[in-house]
Amino acid sequence: MIGPITDRGTHRGAALPFLRRAILCATLAWAAAPAHAEPPLTETGKYILVPTNEYVVRMAMDLLGAHPTVEQLDGVLQGTLPIEDLLSQFLDDPRFHRRLEWIANDFFLTERINVPFFQEALGEMDEEEAAASLGKEPLKLFSYLVEHDLPMTDLVTADYTIADSTLASFWNIDYPGPPGGSEWLKARYRDGRPHAGVLSMQSFYYRYGSTASNKQRGRANAITRIFLDDDHFQRNVAFEFRLAANQEADLDRAVRYNLGCLACHASLEGVVAHLQAIQIGPVGDDIEDRDDFEHYSKQGVERWQLINERVPAYYGRPSDGNLKTLGGYIAQDPRFALTLTKRVTGSLTQTTLDHRDRDLLLALNDVFVQSGFRLKDLVRAIARSDYYRAAGATPPASPEEARNLQPFRMATPEQMASLCMDLTGQTWGNRERPSLEYDPEFKIPAGGYDGEVITKRSFAITPIYLLTYQRNAEALANAVYNAELTGNEPPVEERKVFTLISGREDPVANAAAVRAQIAHWFKRFYGESVSPDGPEATQIYNLLLDFRADRGNNTRQGWRDVLALLLRDPKLYFY
């Protein structure tokens, strides 16, 4: 499935004979499986499961954004490493916590690449660094709770926030670490606001702004959408309404008395009342604008009641208007756990779940609730389910059970960035903020989103998707060439790619070692065990000889061309 590369720095017109198949979804699904590997059926006979080697790669990609080590893969295949133990290793890996931040961002949508307001408040701070910190506040709390095995209800009840020194200096946060500290630590806002997890985070309201006329309703809907899967914008209601001369007064009356408006506002307005202590905005660039925006007004809720004749409530239940009370209601709402179950399951399986998946979601939700809302227990249950491992359905499965099953998954741009860093030690673009993770010009063509204009991932296989990953492979091949093949390379034990050879050996005189390296790459890159003398390694070896000859017998440049091909193989990003 590797086609020609026709870009600078890599061999032109090269193609692997054994990978000339058309890039078709069904073909991609089973290309990586050995011809003799017949996927086993579950006990019900409804699902076709991916082979064990692909299952291990799938878990590693979904949980770590990386591939398993050769030792892990061999351990599972040889029966010396039980799947449960491997899964525990993955769940304790720091890379799992990083993956969780991107899973959380799929619904929080707070990651940023710039600081659109309060530019003067940056001072000497780098804008990109500040944007990263502002976008991560809710996401860091999410991963912090999982890392420390705390209940996920703390998302809306935690008596603290999570901050680094950059975030703390932008907002009025008491950071317990050293000045300039990059570690994310438990911290508190200095203005006396009640802490209720994400509900108290200024960064959350910076992302979800409000205006004087909107009166915090957009923010309230963001809260119900994210935590309860209740998006008032998506409710199917019909109403007749005309604005008169005093438009604002007409709107205020309508949300109280118009039956069509009440279909949403009857539940929304009570939540809105809790947010009146939060300032409208953000607007402006001055430090004064920032100071006004981050001010928490304890009198806001009382003022709202006097002006709007509405009291704080939670879907009809009475409230005192405190954010802690709102967070407590959300945490106790059965929809909170079910929503998180639905979101995490959907992210790990790349499927859109709804009422038709009720039995699956309720079963997973029971595990989540009974564990005390520990996300690791939920993730473990998802990864061990037949639904997660399924690659297809058999006739006994109903159309509802089969509708979401896909023969393969597609690497998200964030997964591809972390995978390539893991495999090669290199990245496309800035090492701290790789292009495929943070730059919309790269990640959107690869199926990603910017969180504002585009808010959902795309899993369509498009030419631009494939072209993006081709360019990524070429950039990585050049980076590996510069890092490991130009004469200033690190010792073999510190390399990520050329781990068995130096890359400078004569490939004919050292054919056995070269073939061993190629076979090692097949297991490391694709999770496949091939013989150094087998047809797969032989074809790559012959390509090396061809590329080397085309490059004036320059072995190192020949290796660069080989890597550009191997790193664009769809088996890397379809798993």
Image (tube, helix red, strand yellow):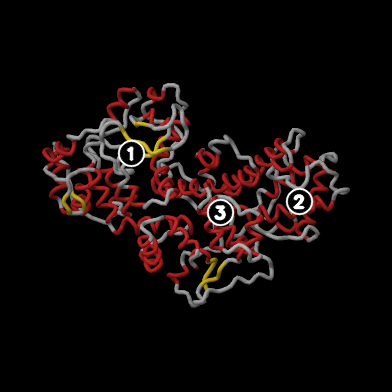
Q: Toward the viewer: 290 or 410?
A: 290
Circle 1 SS class: loop
Q: Residue at x 30, y 47 (%)?
A: 157
Q: Quadrant of the N terminus?
A: bottom right
Q: Is 45 above or below relative to 205?
A: below
Q: Which mark is residue 201?
A: 1
Instruction: Mark 2 or mark 1: name the one nearer the start of the chain.
Output: 1
| Amino acid at circle 3 | Met
The tally of labels here is: 3
Image location of residue 556, percent across then percent down? 78, 40
Image location of residue 111, percent across then percent down? 43, 40
Instruction: Mark 1 or mark 3: name the one nearer the start of the chain.
Output: 3
Residue holding disc 3: 61
Residue 391: image quadrant is: bottom right
User: Mark 3, residues whose alpha carbon is within 10 Å: few (<14), some, or many (≥20)?
Assistant: many
Q: Are marks 2 and 1 in contact (CB under 8 Å)?
A: no
Q: In the figure, is residue 570 to the left or right of 116?
A: right
Q: Residue at x 39, y 28 (%)?
A: 169
| Amino acid at circle 2 | Gln
Q: Quadrant of the C terminus?
A: bottom right
Q: Is 573 above or below relative to 111?
A: below
Residue 219: image quadrant is: top left
Instruction: Mark 3 or mark 2: name the one nearer the start of the chain.
Output: 3
Q: Is residue 281 visible?
A: yes
Residue holding disc 2: 517
User: Mark 1, residues whose alpha carbon is within 10 Å: few (<14), some, or many (≥20)?
Assistant: many
Image location of residue 296, percent across then percent down? 25, 33
| Amino acid at circle 1 | Met
3D distance between C-alphas at marks 1 and 3:
31 Å
Q: Toward the viewer: 232 or 55?
A: 55
User: Mark 2, residues whose alpha carbon is within 10 Å: few (<14), some, or many (≥20)?
Assistant: some
Image location of residue 517, percent across then percent down? 76, 51
